[in-house]
Image (tube, rainbow, N blue to C red):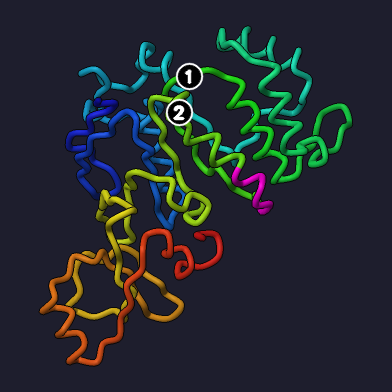
């Protein structure tokens, strides 16, 4: 079932046409985090789209009915300076008329050991990882069917905590729509249905991470569908839309290449992209 229909969206010198469906785990990935964030802000009706992004045939920009159904978080941002659930509940009700499940919040805080990641003075000061954890706890304590989370695992290194967060986000039984702005590819291995790739070349690709593959190859004039530029060693990553004849030609020209999956891309894109 359709969630948002994007028709001729002018974005970063691209014209994007895209259908985002309910009951699919949809991710957005770019080497430039600001590009991902800018797209997600449009997708959540926070920035104008010139009538090109439609929810139930209505422009999503500043759409109150749309806002009632969706929630947007960037886990790299600071939303809380306390873990006092009474204060949080009152603030959310007064500002947004939003219900807040204190039991769910406290359970998430306890499960991840969030209190070990903060210093308590007049306000709570969280470590970077602690801020991600408390943002996740806050998100889980709210009840919206359409979710968009940017930087969902940013600053997290503990494998158990990462698994708690990623599993908690991809719950199709609880959420009708799941959109993720990936800070890490490997943390969501085998958990995504569709990925919008915003390339380094003012192009975009919508891929199935379970089926589509890529080529890691030296940059060359004969290449097409280039996706990412690895500047440190003059390699590029291309979507593997190459014919057998084209691959044979690379071999005859002694142009070395290797095939990689979407989930292996982070190994080649460097720190901050894994």
- Answer with left or right where residue 33 lies relative to residue 79: left
Q: What residue does disc 2 label? A: 147
Q: Position of residue 157 (x, y in %)?
A: 66, 54
The label number, if any, that marks residue 144 in the structure image: 1
User: Which span is picked out in magenta?
Assistant: 157-163
**What residue is rendered at 30% in x and 66% in y?**
214
Residue 205 counted in the magenta span: no
**What residue is rendered at 38% in x and 80% in y?**
234
Q: Position of residue 218 (x, y in %)?
A: 31, 81
Residue 158 counted in the magenta span: yes
Give the dominant element type of the magenta stretch: helix, strand or loop.
Answer: helix
* In contact (CB < 8 Å): disc 2 and disc 1: yes
- Answer with left or right where residue 26 lies relative to residue 205: right
Name the secondary structure under disc 1. Answer: loop
Q: Closest to the observer: 180 or 203?
A: 180
Dot 1, crowdedness within 10 Å: few (<14), some or many (≥20)? many
Name the secondary structure under disc 2. Answer: strand
Q: Quadrant of residue 10?
A: top left
Q: Quadrant of residue 59?
A: top left
């Amino acid at each position: 079932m359709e969630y948002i229909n994007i028709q001729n969206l002018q974005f970063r010198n691209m014209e994007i046409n895209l259908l985002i469906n309910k009951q699919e785990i949809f991710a957005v990935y770019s080497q430039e985090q600001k590009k991902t964030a800018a797209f997600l802000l449009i997708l959540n009706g926070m920035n104008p789209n010139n009538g090109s992004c439609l929810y139930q045939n209505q422009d999503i920009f500043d759409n109150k009915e749309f806002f009632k159904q969706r929630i947007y978080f960037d886990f790299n941002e600071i939303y809380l300076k306390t873990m006092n659930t009474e204060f949080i509940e009152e603030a959310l009700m007064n500002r947004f008329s939003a219900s807040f499940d204190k039991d769910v919040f406290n359970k998430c805080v306890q499960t991840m050991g969030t209190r070990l990641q903060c210093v308590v003075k007049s306000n709570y000061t969280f470590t970077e990882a602690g801020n991600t954890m408390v943002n996740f706890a806050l998100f889980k304590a709210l009840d919206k069917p359409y979710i968009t989370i940017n930087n969902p695992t940013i600053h997290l290194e503990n494998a158990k905590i990462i698994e708690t967060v990623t599993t908690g986000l991809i719950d199709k039984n609880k959420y009708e729509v799941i959109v993720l702005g990936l800070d890490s590819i490997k943390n969501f291995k085998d958990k995504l249905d569709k990925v919008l790739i915003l390339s380094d070349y003012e192009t975009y690709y919508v891929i199935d991470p379970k089926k589509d593959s890529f080529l890691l190859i030296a940059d060359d004039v004969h290449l097409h569908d280039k996706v990412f530029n690895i500047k440190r060693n003059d390699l590029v990553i291309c979507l593997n839309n190459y014919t057998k004849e084209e691959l044979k030609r690379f071999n005859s020209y002694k142009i070395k290449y290797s095939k990689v999956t979407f989930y292996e891309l982070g190994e080649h894109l460097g720190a901050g992209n894994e």
